[in-house]
Image (cartoon, rainbow, N blue to C red):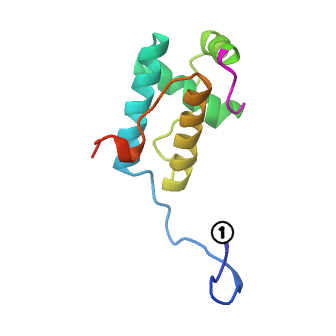
Amino acid sequence: MKTKCPNCNYSYELTPNERTNRTDRQNRLYWIRITIIGDVLGYDKDTMHQVMKRLYLKDHLGVLPKDEFLEYLQRISDEFPTTTKLSTAEMAGYMDFVEMQANELQIALPMPEDYEYN
């Protein structure tokens, strides 16, 4: 990852020594959000998890308008990638995607500061 020194603007490459998987806190908030989306749309949390991760990790379609999302939801198969091994940064990107898709579906989700999920 390229970064700059905030004091002297020197650019350098930062290479992490090890990959840090998603945090327990990210995981708990994610499942709260997925459950809410599923409840609103009439699907269980496991189905919504499969749909959202396929949309984000495999098909890379981006945030879909509500009617396209619902059509996608109805037609996808059971071949889904896993989120278990996502890094903290990758999980953060995925969580942002889930939040944006929920916004497009007009589903309000709790923010980390609004909900106790520790």
Q: Quadrant of residue 65?
A: top right
How many marks on residues? Answer: 1
Which residue matches tag 1?
Answer: 1
Please give left or right for residue 48 compared with residue 11 in the image.
left
Front residue of 37/13: it is 37
| In magenta segment, residue 21 | no
Disc 1, SS: loop
Please give left or right for residue 88 compared with residue 75 in the image.
left
For the record, the magenta segment spans 61-66
In the depicted structure, whether residue 84 falls above or below residue 18: above
Q: Amino acid at mark 1?
A: Met
Q: Residue furthest bottom?
A: 8
- Residue at 55%, 71% in the rendered image: 16
In the depicted structure, whether residue 78 falls above or below residue 54: above
Q: Whole-percent x and y of residue 56?
A: 63, 34
- Residue at 32%, 40% in the rendered image: 115
| In magenta segment, residue 64 | yes
In the depicted structure, whether residue 47 falls above or below residue 63: above
Image quarter where the N terminus lies is bottom right
- Residue at 51%, 47% in the rendered image: 91
Q: Residues within 10 Å of mark 1 (few under 14, many from 20)?
A: few
Q: Quadrant of residue 2?
A: bottom right
The prevailing secondary structure element of the residues shown in magenta is loop
- Residue at 41%, 36% in the rendered image: 110
Q: Whole-percent x and y of residue 28?
A: 35, 40
